[in-house]
Amino acid sequence: MSFDAVKAKETIESGKAVLGLEFGSTRIKAVLVDEANQPIASGSHEWENQLVNGVWTYSLDAIWDGLQDCYSDLAADVKKQYDTEIENLAAIGFSAMMHGYLAFDKNDELLVPFRTWRNTITEQAAKELSELFGFNIPQRWSIAHLYQAILNGEEHVKDVTFFTTLAGYIHWQMTGKKVIGIGDASGMFPIDSETRDYNKEMIDKFNALVAPKGYPWKLQELLPKALLAGEDAGVLTEEGAKKLDVSGKLKAGIPVAAPEGDAGTGMAATNSVAVRTGNVSAGTSVFAMIVLEKALSKAYPEIDMVTTPTGDAVAMVHCNNCTSDLNAWVGLFREFSEAVGVDVDMNKLFGTLYNKALEGDKDCGGVVAYNYFAGEPVTGLNEGRPLMMRTPDAKFSLANFMRANLYASLATLKIGLDLLLKNEDVQVDRIMGHGGLFKTKGVGQSILAAAMNSPVSVMETAGEGGPWGMAILASYLVHKKEGESLDEFLNKSVFADAESMEMKPDAADVAGFDAYIESYKAGIAVEKAAVEAI
């Protein structure tokens, strides 16, 4: 056993390791970290949501089976690597995809099947609440689900005594505490970043709105208590320990961090919790989160307002489409190469085509691409049709073709971000890029820097994503020094030695992307016509 393995084994056996666990939409993943917050073991469980009576859901059985299988997979990894067992931990944290609706009655019974973030069944509620609050309430938010159930006249609403998110539910079952991290809470109901709590004025407006219904509750009685990162959120109970570790080896009494959503854990994992920092996650879908210095002047339907795990306001632009069309075109080039008898390594093919894009005209020479496999709310499309378009006099080269596709992967994000960066003059000192778009060194990074006109960093060694971010938040709970902020903890105890490569925007690239985006916006009418016609 190597020195590092011996050290990791000692950390586990002395109960000093920290566990982070996150429920993603297709995978539940656990990451165990040492005292330096470095991953030393992991476990996972694959799962899928079900469409039941028109509602995307996961059953409670699937939730618990998945959690237990994921933990036992982690325990098996620890046994295999270090020939030891997990009996005690310094801290645990649970996180999950945000939003959705888990509602319980006075007997703690689930009233209706879990309604996940993926559902688009709350359009009327989201629209009415956005107008009432003067604040963008997306369809996936918990309050939109509650109000839609009210609008639908659903019988269960009168019996609700508590509603929460998936992470909030798991934490409650583990600790007995009906609490939630403020970042996750910000996807349930708007947060006031001054008071670091739910927006009281909006709660009063909601209560007045539903008062004629005569329900026996007020909204503030139903919501979990919002906690900041590092605040006491309870400990693992005997019952919770048995629910997590079916082998019965794990001890009760372990401190459990406030449960967070996947946005908050993403911010922690990319060191993007400080004001004027942000991160962009670019894979099948793409989203950007920027921590604001001050509130926006008005609500924008294209921008979701959430918070960091410490309650600072975060503007989020989320787009459904990013790399799917780009990957499809690369797949087509692979087919061509195979057809002419050349077997090409996919990494080499991606690298070659991505780097070719850097040789193209800065504005793509009259070539415009739309990567819409799915609908895109930011540009007002309910469905998508991937589309490649050019003017007759366009410079149609491989370089311009690839550059247009790379621009397309971030174009809708840029439209949303321009509202922040240009209309609202939001200042950004550093953006951290992560996800598949940034795998080819320097290419996706330079395109994003041009899109945002901001320096973009990519870490040489990306962490384990969300579950690692949750482990860091749990570590902060037990290892923070007196008065140490989360930002200070991340910089000193987690990312002090992390290597990252920063790329500043090139002025010609910025001007080129700005020119491209004007053609792109003009051509959205063509994309809409394609959806209607085909």
Image (cartoon, helix red, strand yellow):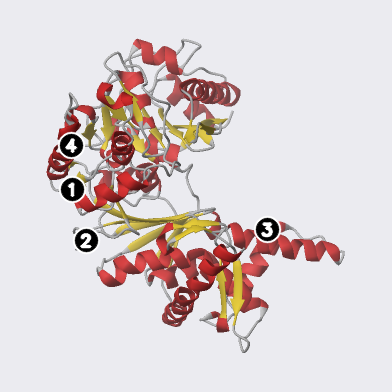
Question: Viewed as shown, does residue 279 lie left or right of 9?
Answer: left
**Dot 3 corresponds to which residue?**
347
Q: What residue is drawn where x is 68% and y is 58%?
A: 347
Quarter assignment of residue 511? bottom left
Whole-angstrom CA distance, mark 3 to mark 2, is: 42 Å
* Secondary structure category for the residue under label 2: loop
Q: Are marks 4 and 2 in contact (CB under 8 Å)?
A: no
First along the sequence among labels 4 and 1: 1
**Dot 2 corresponds to which residue?**
296
Quarter that holds the N terminus: top right
Question: Viewed as shown, does residue 8 lie left or right of 202?
Answer: right
First along the sequence among labels 3 and 1: 1
Instruction: Bin the neighbour count of mark 3 within 10 Å (Cα to Cα): few under 14, some 14-19, many 20 and up.
Output: few
**Dot 4 corresponds to which residue?**
482
Whole-angstrom CA distance, mark 4 to mark 1, is: 22 Å
Q: Position of residue 207 (x, y in %)?
A: 15, 36
Whole-angstrom CA distance, mark 3 to mark 4, is: 47 Å
Name the amino acid type tagged 3: Asn
**Dot 1 corresponds to which residue?**
193
Quarter assignment of residue 169? top left
Marks 3, 4: nearer the viewer: 3
Quarter that holds the C terminus: bottom right
Up the image or down, 454 lies above or below 130; here it is below
Marks 3, 1: nearer the viewer: 1
Whole-angstrom CA distance, mark 4 to mark 2, is: 32 Å
First along the sequence among labels 3 and 2: 2
Marks 4, 1: nearer the viewer: 1
First along the sequence among labels 4 and 2: 2
Question: Viewed as shown, does residue 28 lie left or right of 131?
Answer: right
Name the amino acid type tagged 4: Glu
Q: Position of residue 436 (x, y in %)?
A: 55, 55
How many marks on residues? 4
